[in-house]
Amino acid sequence: RDLYSLHSIAIIMSYFSVGVVLTFTTVPVTFYLIEELGASSTQFAVYTIVCKLPWSFKVIFGFVSDAFPIKGLRRLPYLIIGWTLHITSFLLLALLVRPSVQWVIGGAFTSACGYLLSDVMTDSILVERTKLECYNSRGTLQASGYIARAFGSMVGSMFGAILFNEPEWGWGLTINAIFLMNALVPLVCVLPFIPYLKETVKVTSNSSVKTVLKGHWSAIWNLVQRRVVWQPMLFVYIYNAMMVPNAAWNNFLIEGLHFKDFNLGMIGIAGSVTAWLGLVIYKKYFMRSNWRNVYISTTIFNIAVSTMQIVLILGWNKCVRIPDLAFAVGDDAAQDFLMSMQFLPVVIMYAAICPDGTEGTSYAMLTTLSNIADTVGFVIGDLLTQVFDTSNESLASHKWDGLLKLTLLTSFLQVVPLSLIRLLPSNKEEQRKMQKNQESSKIGGAVFMIVMV
């Protein structure tokens, strides 16, 4: 149960590595695509969507590991395969002289598939161990794991901003060196500890593939029909889909406000630090809080923070002598803090409803549904850049009317899902009562599976 013991440290290091690789290349690649290769808002949105898309594949990764163990092991072999795929993808990008937009998008996609396969395995191992916790402290192990990932994100953001900063400081790594370092992170941090990691369950089954698939499908179908699953997941899906991002914001910062890579790095670092801080604070002070109240309060504050982007667009911050960078950093940091406060309640809810034997599939399926909703939100945001004039040319020439309208719309869309807040259990006790109820609905299950497909 001690995640920092020699036999469990690989779990923490895997989470930490996922955090690092998620953020280490964010600023360098953003600056490289937009500034050096001249990627448009649409092209950059495609890159963002492609990076997000593999998060929707997590259920496939979980199902494969549950149904098809390798030498009796359901997690470790796939954990190694995933990190190997990530390492190979970034090594290939590092070897290219000047990777094109297409190569970067392709490498980012295969890398994301790799580290998310490893992430699913890490999640599954942790969910299996969470069931060994006493009821009152359940969720503590998950909180520790995700805090490690947030800390990795903070480290990745910091070094990504510092090491790729040649235009500002006159020194720094090339984009190829950045790709190489990103490949080496799991090789150094995770693989040395793999031999010590032991799975809690070893599978011994001689069943045919058909029998295995039928058994797993039956278990999943029974799960998604239950009210304790489809009802709160309906809320989570709608809520995440309505968190439509401002897809032109990074282009505005670079083309409109002339932010450099280090400026974007500072924004990323601040966001990672406050996201980590939000998880730490939730674990320490809010583990017993009402989940509905957490969502309502953080959403209201997030709407207020989002609308503050308007101040930056209109330049009102200069009237009180607040620099653009300071204002942008504060805005992004506040948003990441609020989003991290929402994160732990739902993953604790997910872990509690995962049946034995299908932890990989069920947990990944629940997180995948929320990730699909995130992707839907990004697609909507991308489409809205076509409705409003947010081209690089308009942003560079200070024609920001389209950006202002887009910012207003994406900010106020966030309030819509709160009308469905009662679909979410208020706390672990209410969720436990729903589990005991055994109430189910084939319609609810069918809608869940349709969205997944």
Image (tube, rainbow, N blue to C red):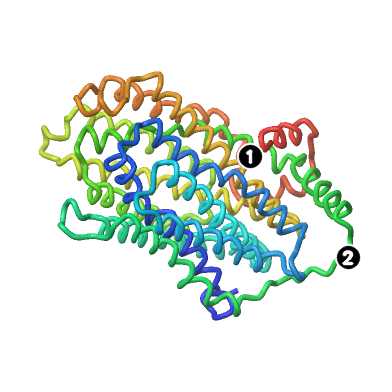
Report which residue position mark 1 lands on: 233
Residue 102, label in figure: none
Q: Name the residue at 22% across, 32% down.
A: 256
Amino acid carrying label 2: it is: Asn
Q: Quadrant of the C terminus?
A: top right
Relative to 388, is 17 above or below? below
Relative to 355, is 238 above or below? above
> In the rendered view, does 353 fall on the left or right side of 41?
right
> In the rendered view, does 93 fall on the left or right side of 229?
left
Q: Percent position (x, y) of residue 403?
A: 30, 25
Residue 357, quarter of picture = bottom right
Residue 162, quarter of picture = bottom left
Amino acid carrying label 1: it is: Met
Q: Quadrant of the N terminus?
A: bottom right
* Residue closest to the eye, 91 or 17: 91
* Residue closest to the eye, 192 or 90: 90
Q: Percent position (x, y) of residue 233?
A: 63, 39
| SS at mark 2 in the image | loop
Residue 206, label in figure: 2
| SS at mark 1 in the image | helix
Q: Percent position (x, y) of residue 313?
A: 23, 29
How many numbered discs sit on the rendered protein?
2
Q: Name the residue at 51% across, 47% down.
A: 109
Residue 297 in view in this figure: no
Q: Name the residue at 51% across, 68% down.
A: 12
Q: Percent position (x, y) of residue 268?
A: 32, 50
> In the rendered view, does 347 fall on the left or right side of 47?
right
Which one is in front in this view, the residue at disc 1 or the one at disc 2?
Answer: 2
Residue 185, quarter of picture = bottom left
* Residue closest to the eye, 263 or 322: 263
